Amino acid sequence: MNNLTVEKSAPKSQATDFCLESSTIEKHSLPSCIEIGLEASKRGDYKLARQMFRTSMHHVDEQDDNQIRAIELTTYIAETHLKEGNYELAEGWYLKALQLSDFDQRKSSLQSVFILAKLAKLQILNSNMTEFEKYMEQMERAYLLLDQKDLSGLLHVLMDTSWSLCQTGRLEYLRPINEIITQIMTMNEEDEARALA
């Protein structure tokens, strides 16, 4: 993707202005800021990735119906900090995403459950098991309030969190995560069986 290096070498204002020109993107089939950010993140250029995600967030902020996109971009920014080992910054961005998801103890969304699972995993990496337990408890309550069928994305995050616990030797914390993983896998199997019937 040669466009990544062109954007990277362009001054900040030019790159930002270029990304926002949707007519340019449509005419030349150039990547969006989000695509550039994701590619930069894959390549380990987290500073450029965050710049592109923030640019996209400014564009999303101008639109009233893009709360899910704002949550996604905020989570992407958190991921770049996590990959750099900046756990405090990552947690701050995850908490911002959680706030955007309108999470509270009486209602839930798949986004809030996903973010709480990410926050729990972050605490494993940060060796803060008290906070891990707090986020796991909130995630379990939020999970129980869900009224959604497609939980495959959540399954991936929970399996990743379970693996992190195994790698750090914290096996005593596995049971609640593995119970949720089992429930999701069972529901997926039941849905597939119904679809085949």
Image (cartoon, rainbow, N blue to C red):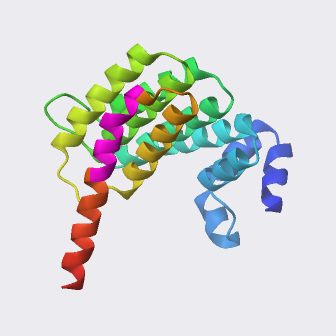
Q: Which image quadrant for residue 111?
A: top left
Q: Position of residue 177 (x, y in %)?
A: 35, 38
Q: Which image quadrant for residue 14?
A: top right
Q: Position of residue 7 (x, y in %)?
A: 79, 49
Q: Residue at x 64, y 43 (%)?
A: 52
Q: Residue at x 32, y 55 (%)?
A: 151
Q: Which image quadrant for residue 79?
A: top right
Q: Is residue 101 left or right of residue 72?
A: left
Q: Residue at x 59, y 60 (%)?
A: 22
Residue 79 in view (yes/no)? yes
| Location of the C terminus (image quadrant) | bottom left
Q: Position of residue 185 (x, y in %)?
A: 31, 58
Q: Is residue 80 left or right of residue 182?
A: right
Question: Which of 98/121 is in front?
Answer: 121
Look at the picture and state if 58 lies above or below 5.
above
Q: Main secondary structure of the magenta part?
A: helix
Residue range highlighted in magenta: 172-182
Look at the picture and state if 116 lies above or below 157.
above
Question: Which of 169/187 is in front?
Answer: 169
